[in-house]
Amino acid sequence: MDVRISRVLFELAQKYRGLDRINFKRAIEVKELIILLVGRGEISTVVGRGGRVILGLTEALRAKLRVIEEGADIHKQVQDILTPAKVRGINILYSGGGEEYRIRVPRAHLKLLPASIDALQALFGKLTDKNIKLVFE
C-alpha cells in the first residue's frame, strides 16, 4: 500500500506545487479506511487548496482517506481520524493487565464515524500499539 500511495503522490506532484516536498511516513489500511501519516505541519499540503490533492488521492485509491501528523498527541490523532464526529475525551484505565485507552464519543455522532467501530478500534491499535476501545455516551 505504501508503494502504491507513493506512486500516486508522485503523479500528483507533477500537477500540484509543494507536494514533492512532503514527508510521507506510512499508510495504515483497515477495511474501508486508509490513514496517511505525514510529517509535522504537512497536512495542509496533502489536502491541497480546496481539497484538490486529497480528492485526487481518494479517486486514485478508491477509498476513504484521513491524513494525520506523525508524532502528534493521541487526542489530536484520534480527532483527525474521527472527524466530523467529536471526541469528548480520552480516559486511561489502569488494571493488572496494563493500560486501556477509552475514547469517549457522543452517541449522537455514531452515524458520523468514517468506518465501522471494529475497524476504527483495530486502526487505533495499529497506530498507537495500545489497547483502545471506543465508548459511546
Image (tube, rainbow, N blue to C red):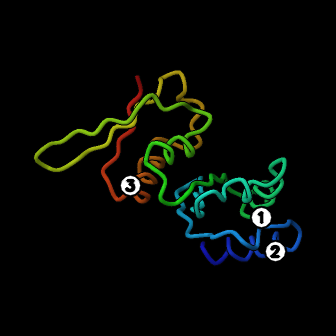
Q: Badge 1: how crowded within 10 Å, few (<14), some, or many (20+)? A: few
Residue nearest the observer in this picture, 97 or 14: 14
Q: Is residue 46 left or right of residue 110?
A: right
Q: Residue at x 76, y 73 (%)?
A: 20
Quarter of the image for residue 83 reads: top right
Measured Cα–Cα span from mark 3 to mark 2:
31 Å
Residue tagged 1 = 60
Q: Are marks 2 and 1 in contact (CB under 8 Å)?
A: yes
Residue tagged 2 = 11
- Examine the rendered structure and indicate whether residue 32 appears above or below residue 113: below
Which secondary structure, mark 2? helix
Q: Is residue 127 left or right of residue 64?
A: left
Res 125 label: 3
Measured Cα–Cα span from mark 3 to mark 1:
26 Å
Which secondary structure, mark 1? helix
User: Residue 130: percent from the left, percent from the top?
Assistant: 32, 54
Quarter of the image for residue 40 reads: bottom right
User: Residue 129: percent from the left, percent from the top?
Assistant: 34, 59
Assign the C terminus to one quadrant of the image. Answer: top left
Assign the N terminus to one quadrant of the image. Answer: bottom right
Q: Looking at numbered disc 1 in the image, what kind of residue is underneath it? A: Ala
